[in-house]
């Protein structure tokens, strides 16, 4: 990707999402649900304010793929622990590193400590930002990347685009998507999706590495935050 001139990017809304895939389903994960819940509560409760009312065991449609233990921090973050994966989502990124801790790593390590022999296959991280461009119109920003637009379909407002990248270091694959923001008037939406090799990426490095890469990617496409 060519390095574009930096522009000011006033971020108004962010999201961090993780899916950690187990190497194989852990069928006995909920065999002793009280014991597992106690492990989660003891590890996360004191540092992150997790309450009993924030833990919920859900069966969904009843299939094994839907069964999960949901951990909720209203308006801050949510984690769901399935038999084959762990999902974590937050739109308040400060909470993920509350008081110099790391919620991503703490959730994954707590599960690993309880199960004992659990291993992860890959970590898929999705990062999104909606923001306003300062000093440049959205149309002009996208014109840097797309110069040819189909004619005869009405006035051209701009164009969304996506870049895809292959394996490098601990990254198995990654992609960058640019589009119109649906939440910021006249703004830009940027999404960075990364698939990490779990054998090369320790849980303690996931959040730090992913967020650093996202900042770098934004700069390289001309969005300085």
Image (cartoon, grey):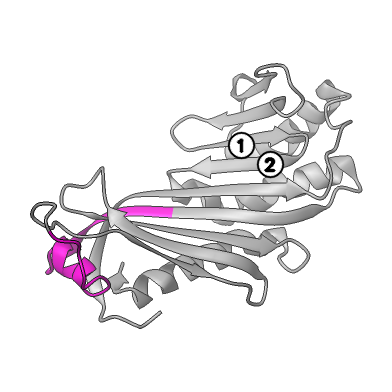
| Crowding near the residue tagged with mark 1, few <14, some 14–19, many ≥20 C-alpha atoms within 10 Å | many
Marks 2 and 1, how far apart at CA? 7 Å
Q: Position of residue 2 (x, y in %)?
A: 36, 83
Magenta segment: 128-151
Answer yes or no: is residue 101 visible. Answer: no
Q: Is residue 156 above or below residue 209?
A: above
Q: Residue at x 19, y 60 (%)?
A: 158
Q: Quadrant of residue 142?
A: bottom left
State if disc 1 and disc 2 touch (CB < 8 Å): yes
- Front position among marks 2 and 1: 2
Pick the residue in front: 182 or 35.
182
Is 16 magenta? The answer is no
Res. 66 mark:
none
| Crowding near the residue tagged with mark 2, few <14, some 14–19, many ≥20 C-alpha atoms within 10 Å | many
The residue that mark 1 highlights is 79
Is 145 magenta? The answer is yes
The residue that mark 2 highlights is 86
Q: Position of residue 41 (x, y in %)?
A: 72, 31
Q: Position of residue 23 (x, y in %)?
A: 82, 50
Pick the residue in front: 40 or 214.
214
Q: Residue at x 60, y 24 (%)?
A: 54
Q: How many marks?
A: 2
Answer yes or no: is residue 173 visible. Answer: yes
28 sits to left or right of 185: right
């Amino acid at each position: 990707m060519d390095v574009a001139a930096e522009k000011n990017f006033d971020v108004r809304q962010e999201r961090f999402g993780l899916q950690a895939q187990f190497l194989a389903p852990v069928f006995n994960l909920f065999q002793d649900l009280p014991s597992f819940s106690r492990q989660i509560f003891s590890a996360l409760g004191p540092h992150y304010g997790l309450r009993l009312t924030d833990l919920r065991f859900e069966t969904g449609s009843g299939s094994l793929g839907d069964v999960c233990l949901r951990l909720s921090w209203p308006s801050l973050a949510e984690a769901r622990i399935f038999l084959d994966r762990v999902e974590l989502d937050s739109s308040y990124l400060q909470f993920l590193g509350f008081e110099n801790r790391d919620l991503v790593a703490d959730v994954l390590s707590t599960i690993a400590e309880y199960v004992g022999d659990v291993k992860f296959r890959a970590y898929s991280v999705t990062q999104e930002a909606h923001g306003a461009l300062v000093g440049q119109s959205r149309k002009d920003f996208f014109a840097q990347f797309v110069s040819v637009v189909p004619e005869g379909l009405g006035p051209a407002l701009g164009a969304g685009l996506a870049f895809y990248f292959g394996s490098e270091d601990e990254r198995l694959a990654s992609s960058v998507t640019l589009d119109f923001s649906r939440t910021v008037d006249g703004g830009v939406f940027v999404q960075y999706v990364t698939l990490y090799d779990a054998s090369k990426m320790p849980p303690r490095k996931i959040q730090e590495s992913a967020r650093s890469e996202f900042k770098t990617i934004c700069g390289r496409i001309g969005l300085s935050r």
